[in-house]
Image (cartoon, helix red, strand yellow):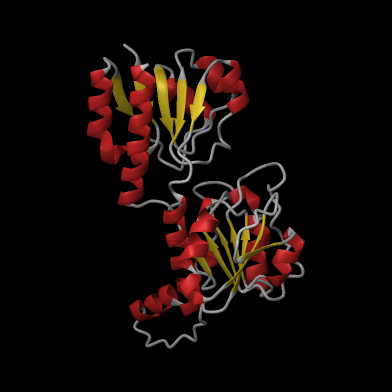
């Protein structure tokens, strides 16, 4: 019997629908979830060896996996980012790869707005002080009229730009090309960093973007008050930015993604009042899960119904 295997925990909320659809076509559906953010390639071989279709999260699928998993016909990426999948090797092995783009951007944008306001108004810090029975009066800053720079102007950036309209922020961005979007200004990465008060990293991970946000590239970021990374951890030099927070050359930092997930961070770093840490969770809502799972269910129905 052919088998559909999900290694993405976010399919679980619609497990009954996935089971029902698989049964309709005489297939078995099962879920095998990693303890951390995703399975390694060796772990993936063990998990999807019998799969003809796999639904994956942030799992590593390289040439080794594709050679070992001979039953595999389709890979469906839960979400948009396919940087963990060797698509070229998949195509050579006649394995089709699908993803679910332009769905999660609005949910990530909503989360980023929360990080921006929390960082500026010191909400989490105030909460911690209250837990310590300290009547703490933090001097917050306002989000109104800030210059917001986007490194990568895709679905997340477009959604957040709409949300920020009432705050009267100036929107600038750096991308591969000038997208000619009304109300925004295209700049080189260097120029954008120099002008930004808030810098949001939401570019895809490529050879060009890997490690591109670092101490050197932020050298002239005199106006920068807050840096947020909700893309991939490898785009920034994590250690260098944390060091910049420690020496005061970077004021505030929000990290939802890390070079290694989960990260191994020292206690003094975790307790730094100028850094907000979250667990690669920016798009994780009940609504987002429902929306993406419906798209995947429709794709499965299309594949299996051919």
- Where is residue 305 shown, x and y percent of the image? 33, 18
**How many labels, in total?**
0
Q: Nearer the viewer, residue 222 or 42?
A: 222
Residue 20 as seen in the image, left or right of residue 271: left
- Where is residue 171 shown, x and y percent of the image? 60, 67
Question: In the rendered image, is residue 250 in sight?
Answer: yes
Seen at 47% across and 59% down, the residue is 109
Seen at 34% across and 31% down, the residue is 298
- Where is residue 60 shown, x and y percent of the image? 53, 32
Q: Nearer the viewer, residue 41 or 218?
A: 218
Seen at 41% across and 79% down, the residue is 126
Query: From the viewer's perspective, is residue 42 above or below residue 241?
Result: above
Q: Nearer the viewer, residue 286 or 43?
A: 286
Question: Considering the image in quadrants, where does the C terminus appear?
Answer: top left
Question: Considering the image in quadrants, where does the N terminus appear?
Answer: top left
Query: From the viewer's perspective, is residue 98 above or below residue 220?
Result: above
Question: In the rendered image, is residue 32 in sight?
Answer: no
Query: From the viewer's perspective, is residue 157 above or below residue 127?
Result: above
Task: Identify the image quadrant of residue 198.
Answer: bottom right
Task: Identify the image quadrant of residue 55.
Answer: top left
Q: Nearer the viewer, residue 289 or 157?
A: 157
Residue 19 as seen in the image, left or right of residue 60: left
- Where is residue 120 shown, x and y percent of the image? 50, 76
Residue 135 as seen in the image, left or right of residue 117: left
């Amino acid at each position: 019997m052919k088998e559909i295997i999900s290694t993405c925990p976010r399919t679980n909320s619609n497990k009954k629908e996935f089971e029902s659809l698989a049964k309709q076509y005489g297939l078995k559906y099962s879920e095998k979830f990693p303890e951390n953010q995703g399975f390694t390639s060796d772990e993936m071989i063990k998990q999807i060896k019998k799969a003809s279709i796999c639904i994956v999260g942030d799992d590593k699928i390289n040439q080794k996996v594709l050679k070992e998993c001979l039953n595999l016909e389709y890979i469906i990426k839960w979400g948009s980012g396919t940087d963990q999948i060797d698509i070229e090797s998949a195509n050579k092995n006649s394995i089709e790869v699908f993803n679910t783009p332009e769905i999660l951007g609005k949910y990530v944008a909503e989360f980023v707005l929360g990080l921006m306001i929390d960082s500026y108004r010191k909400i989490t810090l105030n909460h911690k002080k209250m837990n310590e029975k300290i009547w703490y009066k933090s001097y917050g800053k306002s989000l109104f009229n800030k210059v917001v720079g986007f490194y990568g102007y895709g679905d997340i950036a477009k959604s957040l730009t709409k949300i920020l309209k009432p705050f009267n922020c100036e929107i600038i961005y750096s991308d591969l090309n000038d997208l000619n979007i009304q109300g925004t200004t295209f700049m080189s990465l260097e120029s954008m960093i120099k002008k930004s008060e808030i810098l949001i990293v939401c570019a895809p991970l490529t050879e060009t973007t890997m490690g591109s946000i670092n101490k050197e590239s932020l050298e002239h970021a005199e106006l920068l008050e807050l840096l947020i990374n909700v893309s991939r951890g490898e785009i920034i030099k994590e250690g260098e930015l944390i060091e910049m927070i420690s020496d005061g050359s970077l004021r505030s930092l929000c990290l939802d993604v890390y070079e290694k997930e989960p990260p191994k961070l020292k206690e003094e770093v975790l307790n730094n009042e100028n850094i907000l840490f979250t667990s690669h969770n920016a798009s994780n809502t009940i609504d987002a899960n429902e929306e993406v799972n419906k798209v995947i269910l429709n794709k499965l129905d299309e594949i299996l119904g051919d």
